[in-house]
Image (cartoon, grey):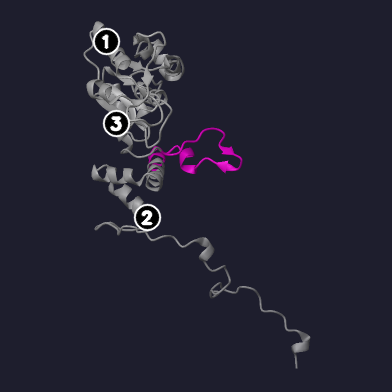
């Protein structure tokens, strides 16, 4: 996978190129990163890449010429490696929200060209001519597209084969299909007791089925509380089992009736509710003690 980035600050991308699992994967040649500065495609002494907006208003707008020239250079460099034309994605608040499915699609592709805007925005003519998709991280505004691009790259690179030490790690991520698209369950490590708080008992049991069920229920509870729309999405896709639905109903305070043909176990009466020995119970123990001797004061 090859990622090309058009940015005024190429040095910001050393974070994913040199550090952590993405840096190790880059050193191993599992992915490539190439940065293109629009200032290198200007023709004036000041290397101008922005100007005032037509119609007035605050801020500056990035000019279309340097951006398009940078994209063309990136496409030509990719063609030199035998790659076809890459999608061109602009990081922008109006874009489609980037999610795990988007990261998986990017990881399965040959890559793309990311455009990192700055200032008030990018000239619309460049968008109309060159951009094939727009990506957003959410309903907030950053000072530039670089931080958003770093997130897009990191989320995809970690999914490439061989990048993570344990290939199953990504399968247990939040939003992954193996978790029915739900949030991941809480995690614990040593010490077993920290500041009086112990690791939940099921995780210490060694019983794999109980551990799996505990994690599933915590995932369901966390998702229902914080991202209920993910529950509805999983339900619509048929990813929730009858056991899942029963647990969710109990969480909501509306437990489902027992299924036909099943017998519900009678709950054992708690020991604390049982009557103490000798209280409110007839004494049926035979009295084998000898008759007491009469007290002289009782003899008439």
- The alpha-carbon separation of the residues under discs 1 and 3 comes to 25 Å
Can you say which quadrant of the picture contains the C terminus?
bottom right
Circle nearer the N terminus (1, 3) = 1
Residue shown at the point (34%, 54%) measured from the top left: 249
Residue shown at the point (47%, 36%) measured from the top left: 187
- Residue under label 1, please give it: 78
Q: Is residue 145 magenta?
A: no
Query: Mark 3 falls on what kind of element?
Result: helix
Quarter-wise, where is residue 157 in the image?
top left
- The alpha-carbon separation of the residues under discs 1 and 2 comes to 55 Å
Task: Name, please, the residue furthest toward the bottom.
Answer: 300
Instruction: Specify start and end residues of the magenta stretch as a single range.
Output: 185-213
- Residue under label 3, please give it: 101
The answer to whether residue 52 is seen in the rendering is yes
Quarter-wise, where is residue 14 in the image?
top left
- Residue under label 2, please give it: 250
């Amino acid at each position: 996978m090859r990622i090309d980035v058009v940015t005024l600050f190429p040095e910001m991308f050393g974070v994913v190129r040199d550090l952590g699992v993405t840096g190790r994967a880059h050193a191993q040649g599992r992915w490539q990163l190439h940065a293109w500065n629009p200032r290198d495609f200007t023709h004036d002494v000041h290397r101008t890449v922005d100007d005032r907006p037509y119609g007035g208003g605050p801020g500056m707008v990035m000019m279309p010429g340097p951006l398009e020239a940078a994209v063309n250079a990136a496409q030509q460099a990719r063609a030199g490696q035998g790659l076809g034309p890459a999608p061109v994605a602009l990081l922008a608040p109006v874009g489609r929200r980037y999610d795990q499915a988007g990261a998986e699609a990017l990881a399965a592709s040959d890559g793309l060209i990311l455009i990192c805007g700055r200032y008030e925005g990018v000239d619309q003519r460049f968008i109309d001519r060159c951009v094939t998709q727009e990506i957003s991280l959410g309903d907030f505004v950053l000072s530039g597209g670089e931080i958003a691009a770093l997130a897009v790259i990191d989320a995809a690179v970690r999914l490439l084969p061989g990048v993570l030490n344990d290939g199953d790690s990504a399968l247990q991520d939040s939003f992954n299909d193996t978790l029915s698209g739900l949030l991941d369950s809480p995690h614990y490590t040593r010490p077993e007791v920290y500041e009086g708080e112990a690791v939940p008992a099921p995780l210490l049991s060694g019983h794999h089925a109980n551990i799996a069920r505990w994690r599933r229920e915590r995932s369901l509870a966390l998702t229902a509380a914080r991202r209920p729309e993910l529950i509805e999405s999983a339900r619509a896709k048929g990813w929730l089992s009858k056991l899942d639905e029963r647990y969710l109903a109990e969480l909501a305070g509306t437990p489902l009736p027992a299924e036909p043909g099943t017998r519900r176990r009678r709950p054992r009466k708690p020991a604390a509710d049982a009557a103490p020995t000798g209280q409110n119970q007839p004494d049926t123990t035979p009295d084998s003690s000898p008759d007491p001797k009469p007290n002289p004061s009782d003899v008439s």
